Image (cartoon, rainbow, N blue to C red):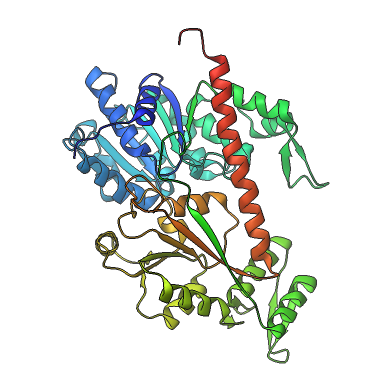
């Protein structure tokens, strides 16, 4: 297939080729992988780089990058090797042009591969760079001592700030060694953010001036392109399906919410939460239809959401991708709807690829998946145009990335996203949080673009 870049692709290619450290933060579904591949091939032709190491979520590293390389006429000659499949002690530059691995492998790479000479890589690509947004993360810390061995470093993601602006710190630091936002996350946070509680658990940006200053510091590093700018098919339509929980279930829910404790089966079964964070998860489970008790066993609370899902699927004219975050929800759905297909993490790579092939061929009516397992990199737009969330998530990144499996270039129909919501529960709070974070994400992207335009030299 011949790749014909549009204006947004061309801007991305020029941005990556024009600077040794660069971030490409483009809207989900725009085509950042082929943009990065084209920029890499361009640098290879110019003699600036020979090899690339791509670090990505596991399915993206094992499936998406090899598939994308083989898909396009201008990159299909490139060789791709996954470092999970080889003895790291034997890896050398001549083995491949592109090496891929997943973030979980970083400590192993740092121990067994990076200290070797000659160093086998030129370009380092962080695909879905939000995977390293945690400044306390052990994975990225293992990599920090070796970053300067790479002549070029790129960060790619469609959701650079899914929750707030603090999340760009590590994504920027791994590219510029702390030149723009500093080397210490805590100093960065103290300078630009303020705590909203006495214990300093939650922080927000201090004011508009602080927000503008952070974005101005990274405007020469990060290029943002929104889906609207790239003319991706219109924003998905969101439809909420509200279910009413039985009175007794709501009474039990409210008791758990109030007391952090609930006794079931005349006191024989206990459901408790040790903290507010645990409580939120327990309430989400309860509202979804089943909850883990103190012994780790699943306790059924109601059938309302499963019934609502079953009814919706029966009414849909096409195929549906169903997102579900809890294993016991998945088990309940599969028990009630035995015909649904499930992307199981325990499946082999070949089994997963075959299931995804069948989905894209339109042969799978319902595909059930945990959003964290297929929420990045996979092209599923050929199989359908409906996403169903069994429960709305808190994470804007999970939400946008999962929806973008269908709402992306190549999708010929308007995508509809259904959210099954239990009235009067934490589901409603999750929807409000998603909306707020989505507005912030769009606002940051537009503001960064405006700052870059204002700072652009005359004639540039």
Judged from this view, the residue extending furthest toward the bottom is 266
Is 319 rendered above or below residue 254? above
Residue 160: give x, y in percent of width and height.
Answer: 53, 39
**Could you say which is closer to the camera, residue 408 or residue 275?**
408
Number of labels in the image equals 0
Judge from the rendering whether residue 226 lies leftward or rightward of residue 152; answer left or right. right
Q: Residue furthest right?
A: 198
Q: Is residue 135 in sight in this rendering? A: no
* Outermost residue toward the top in this view: 458
- Which of the 4 image quarters holds residue 169? top right
**Residue at the location (57% across, 27% down)?**
448
Q: Position of residue 452 (x, y in %)?
A: 54, 21
Q: Nearer the viewer, residue 172 or 230?
A: 230
| Of residues 202 and 424, the one drawn nearer to the viewer in this rendering | 424
Q: Is residue 267 above or below residue 241?
A: below
Image quadrant occupied by the C terminus: top left
Say left or right for 201 vs 391: right
Q: Is residue 221 visible?
A: yes
Q: Residue sitting at 61 percent across and 80 percent down?
A: 295
Residue 170 position by quadrant: top right
Residue 454 pos. (x, y %): 57, 16
Residue sitting at x 36%, y 39%: 31
Left or right, residue 283 beside residue 296: right
Quadrant in which residue 214 is drawn: top right
Relative image position of residue 251 (x, y in whole percent): 75, 81
Figure quadrant of the N terminus:
top left
């Amino acid at each position: 297939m011949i790749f014909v870049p549009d204006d947004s692709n061309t801007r991305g290619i020029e941005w990556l080729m024009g600077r040794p450290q660069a971030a490409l933060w483009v809207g989900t579904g725009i085509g950042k992988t082929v943009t990065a591949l084209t920029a890499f091939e361009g640098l290879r032709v110019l003699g600036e780089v020979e090899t690339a190491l791509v670090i990505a979520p596991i399915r993206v590293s094992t499936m998406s990058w090899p598939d994308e390389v083989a898909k396009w006429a201008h990159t299909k000659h490139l060789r791709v090797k996954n470092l999970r499949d080889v003895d790291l002690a034997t890896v050398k530059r001549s083995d491949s042009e592109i090496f891929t691995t997943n973030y979980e492998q970083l400590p192993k790479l740092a121990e067994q591969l990076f200290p070797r000479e000659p160093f086998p890589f030129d370009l380092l690509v962080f695909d879905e760079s939000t995977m390293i947004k945690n400044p306390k993360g052990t994975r990225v810390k293992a990599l920090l001592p070796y970053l300067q061995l790479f002549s070029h470093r790129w960060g790619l993601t469609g959701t650079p700030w899914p929750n707030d602006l603090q999340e760009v710190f590590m994504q920027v630091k791994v590219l510029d060694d702390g030149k723009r936002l500093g080397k210490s996350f805590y100093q960065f946070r103290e300078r630009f953010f303020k705590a909203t509680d006495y214990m300093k658990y939650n922080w927000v940006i201090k004011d508009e001036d602080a927000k503008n200053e952070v974005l101005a510091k990274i405007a020469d590093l990060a290029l943002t392109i929104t889906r609207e700018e790239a003319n991706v098919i219109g924003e998905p339509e969101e439809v909420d399906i509200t279910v009413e929980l039985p009175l007794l279930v709501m009474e039990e829910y409210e008791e758990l919410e109030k007391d952090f404790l609930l006794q079931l089966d005349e006191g024989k079964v206990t459901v408790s939460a040790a903290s507010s964070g645990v409580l939120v998860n327990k309430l989400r489970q309860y509202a979804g239809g089943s909850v883990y008790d103190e012994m780790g066993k699943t306790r059924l609370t109601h059938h309302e959401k499963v019934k609502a899902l079953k009814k919706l699927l029966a009414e849909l004219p096409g195929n549906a991708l169903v997102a579900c975050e809890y294993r016991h929800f998945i088990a309940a759905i599969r028990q009630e709807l035995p015909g649904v297909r499930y992307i199981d993490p325990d499946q082999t790579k070949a089994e997963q690829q075959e299931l995804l092939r069948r989905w894209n061929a339109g042969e799978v009516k319902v595909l059930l998946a945990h959003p964290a397992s297929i929420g990045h990199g996979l092209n599923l737009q050929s199989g359908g145009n409906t996403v169903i969330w069994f429960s709305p998530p808190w994470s804007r990144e999970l939400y946008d990335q999962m929806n973008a499996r269908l709402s992306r270039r190549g999708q010929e129909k308007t995508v509809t996203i259904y959210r099954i919501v239990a009235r009067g529960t934490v589901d409603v709070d999750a929807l409000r949080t998603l909306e707020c974070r989505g507005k912030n994400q769009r606002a940051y992207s537009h503001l960064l673009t405006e700052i870059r335009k204002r700072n652009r030299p005359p004639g540039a």
